[in-house]
Amino acid sequence: MSHKDAGRTGKVRKTRFPISLFFIFFGILLLMSGVHMGIIVLMNEREWHSTVQIVLPLLYWMAVALGMTLYTKWRVKKTYEAPMQSLAEATGKVAGGDFSVFVPTNHTAARLDYIDIMILNFNKMVEELGSIETLKTDFFSNVSHEIKTPLAVIQNHAELLGKEGLSPEKQREYTEVILQATKRLSALITNMLKLNKLEKQAIKPLPQSYDLPDQLCRCALQFEEQWEKKKIEFTAELEDRALIEADPGLLEMVWNNLFSNAIKFTPPGGSVTLSQTSDADTVYVSVSDTGCGMSEETMAHIFDKFYQGDPSHSTEGNGLGLALVKRILELTDGTISVRSEPGRGSVFTVALPVSREDKRYE
Ligand SMILES: Nc1ncnc2c1ncn2[C@@H]1O[C@H](COP(=O)(O)OP(=O)(O)OP(=O)(O)O)[C@@H](O)[C@H]1O
Ligand SMILES: [Mg+2]
């Protein structure tokens, strides 16, 4: 339960001091003074020695004071010391790098007080720290892996190129492999830098009103050579005009990533369709292909950094494309959705708000 949840119940107690303590002490003192009177009467009746008459009540009240002190100690321990000690122990573990700690609260959700809220917030903080730590470790291992693979390819092929008596074809082949690996490395670094800047909001989108079908057309044409080489049939169904208000440079990255994926994951002879429609408030762009498709499991992760679902293509790209797309659309008030069936193909649909300028002309 989070702080917000706890706050929502409106029952967060501001103090742990039990008012009932007054009544408990009052009751005890009343009872004990009754017993005290009884002792006095008894001692008078039996005419005990005067020293005993002084010492016995003294001892009696000492026992009462000891009982009350022990009772107060128990209450303080239960109320403050026990939760503070478990919190202190937990902070020690977190400081030592163990993020699996969980401190239980004393009260149920309906009777939370400020110490319970502090414990709940501490648990939440530790959980967040743990996930950041995992993300960081994952990020480093992913980056190292993505850098190591092309580097190994470059090293191997450079060694092969160094051998004597290589035919010109082999030389060309090895050079091409090295070139591809360097391109992959440079794409990795570029995408990582872009993603980092977008996440830090260092790139501020510069929205302007512009014609989307025109941009889609230009981006698609850049892939002409690729779809022709793979004998993929490319079809575009676009409106004549659709104004949107967005940063054209950022959206260009979105379209390029969607086209490159569609072409990459579609086998030769397949088809890729780009379609763009709009209604009063939204412009929709969908890129569909008849490629390998994705399982539900893969679809759940495609927007994660470095995730690559299809192992047969993992030598191409670094799994950063869709993470970039997602981030750009978050900054542009757009959304992206995907439908896919393994073996049949995929449809990526982007929705963007219509430009206000366009609405005015309606
Ligand atoms: N059109 C598609 N058809 C089938 N699978 C797809 C499609 N688009 C994306 N995927 C799956 O989503 C994964 C992540 O895509 P993403 O674009 O982020 O990475 P990538 O294309 O592998 O690498 P990069 O974009 O960095 O070159 C892909 O590896 C693939 O498994
Ligand atoms: Mg991609």
Image: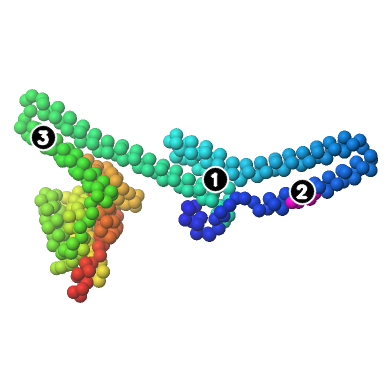
Q: Which residue does the numbered mark 1 point to in the structure image?
A: 104
Q: CA distance from mark 1 to mark 2?
A: 36 Å
Residue at numbered disc 3: 175
The residue carrying pointer 3 sits among few (fewer than 14), some (14 to 19) or many (20 or more) residues within 10 Å by Cα, namely some
Determine whether 200 is above or below 156 in the image: below
Q: Where is residue 75 shown, x and y percent of the image?
A: 65, 44
Q: Which mark is residue 47?
A: none
Q: Residue at x 24, y 44 (%)?
A: 192
Q: Which residue is painted at 17% across and 55% down in the image? A: 249
Alpha carbons under labels 3 and 1: distance apart: 62 Å
Image label count? 3
Residue 346 located left or right of residue 221? right
Please name the amino acid that badge 1 sits on. Pro
Secondary structure beneath disc 2? helix
Sequence-wise first label, 1 or 2? 2
Range shown magenta: 26-31
For the point 62% across and 50% down, which residue is it?
Answer: 17
**Res 356 seen here:** yes
Q: Are marks 1 and 2 in contact (CB under 8 Å)?
A: no
For disc 2, the neighbor class at 10 Å (few under 14, some 14 to 19, many from 20) is some
Mark pair 3, 2: CA separation: 96 Å
Q: Is residue 202 magenta?
A: no
